[in-house]
Image (cartoon, rainbow, N blue to C red):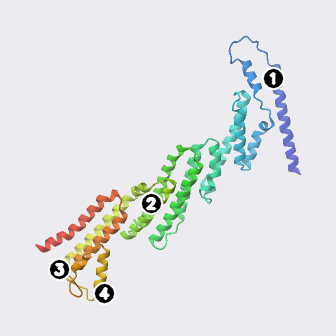
Amino acid sequence: KIKKEWLEVLEDTKKSKALSEKRQREEENLHSPVIPEMSANPFSSDERLSDEEEVNLNLDWIQELPEDLDVCIAQRNFEGAVDLLDKLNSYLEDKPLTHSVKDLKTKIDERVRQLTDVLVFELSPERSLRGGPKATRRAVSQLIRLGQFTKACELFLKNRAVAVQTAIRQLRIEGATLLYINKLCNVFFTSLLETAKEFEMDFAGNSGCYSAFIVWSWSALKIFVDAFSKQVFDSKESLSTAAECVKVAKEHCKHLSEVGLDLTFILHALLVKDIKAALQSYKDIIIEATKHRNSEEMWRKMNLMTPEALGKLREEMRHCGVSSFDQYTGDECWVNLSYTIVAFTKQTMTFLEEALKLYFPELHMVLLESLVEIILVAVQHVDYSLR
């Protein structure tokens, strides 16, 4: 009851204030001196006065507009507030800029600033992280309607950057590395794809914002690669595990092409340093192992004792790509090669197979040089033994 009484008082006060302002303006017009029509200046004061008379700002909805905007902002009815602003802009579009119009615009501009501040707060990460990219749509669309394209784009991308970081941080590192990397790729690339789709929907008519999205994608991918490398390369995983993890990341990255986004080359550029280091590290391990075996070389044929063991070795060599291994097998369980040569072949071919899973053009020379270095160690040992 009290609330109703207050609202009635407010309404009466608003009407009486509007009425008194109207009377005051009429009195001013009556008491203002009449300027004789002598001046040839088309922009003389009498012309300006007639302009003011042409713009009717005494309409109820215009008089109540500042208060209505305050109510919409307080009730978080952002669409309603922007609709009112659009209505006013349409009404004033073809009207001259008089003193009264300027005064009204000053009042309205203050409300636009308040509305913008509230929309900016709505886009802050703590407000809209849980709902994913769609949770930002309402605030973004109203900022765009207010002509704040750049601010809407910047805040949307900042919001999504925090969301990506939070999602990666919340992933628990447990179990096998490959299992964690599968989860990491799923979380990151799904989030990136959803962000791209939402961005395309929100900023469809503003192609100038797309360059900002590409720059943001690069920085988001860098956050992903930091987490990826920390788990795969810093923990000194085997080359085969690293190869499988990189393969998973590449496959997920290709899914972005469904929205026309290809970040594969950026992924390669960010991973190339760690992959080079992994290849060189594994090359050093093979060289050390080869040198150790060479130091114990007796140049004796291998005796595998049982046909089953020979069959298993034959299968292993075929898997390594040595299809002509049968020509080196002798009677029963003998192989006409030394243990050192067989072990070196298996290790080198495994290195090549895993390295090719990691391969992209930037790694071409690193891979070739590593293979040459490994093979030279074996060739030099054979040469030394012959001499």
Q: Earlier in the sequence, mark 4 or mark 3?
A: 3
- Residue carrying label 1: 28
Q: CA distance from mark 1 to mark 3?
A: 118 Å
> In front of the other: label 1 or label 3?
3
Residue drawn 62% across the image and 59% down it: 131
What kind of element bears circle 4?
A: helix
Quadrant of the rendered image containing residue 293: bottom left
Task: Pinpoint residue 15: horizontal percent, then vertical percent.
Answer: 85, 37
Q: CA distance from mark 4 to mark 3?
A: 24 Å
What kind of element bears circle 2?
A: helix
- Contact? badges 2 and 3 (CB < 8 Å): no
> In front of the other: label 2 or label 3?
3
Q: CA distance from mark 2 to mark 3?
A: 47 Å
- Residue carrying label 4: 308
What kind of element bears circle 3?
A: loop
- Residue carrying label 2: 226
Q: Earlier in the sequence, mark 2 or mark 4?
A: 2
Residue drawn 47% across the image and 71% down it: 179
- Residue carrying label 3: 299
Q: How many residues crowd mark 3 within 10 Å: few (<14), some (14–19), many (20+)?
A: few
Q: Amino acid at mark 3?
A: Trp
Q: Amino acid at mark 2?
A: Asp
Q: Outermost residue, top direction?
A: 38
Task: Pinpoint residue 289: horizontal percent, then vertical percent.
Answer: 26, 73
Image disc number at residue 63: none
Task: Pinpoint residue 178: horizontal percent, then vertical percent.
Answer: 45, 70
Q: Amino acid at mark 1?
A: Glu
Q: Amino acid at mark 4?
A: Glu
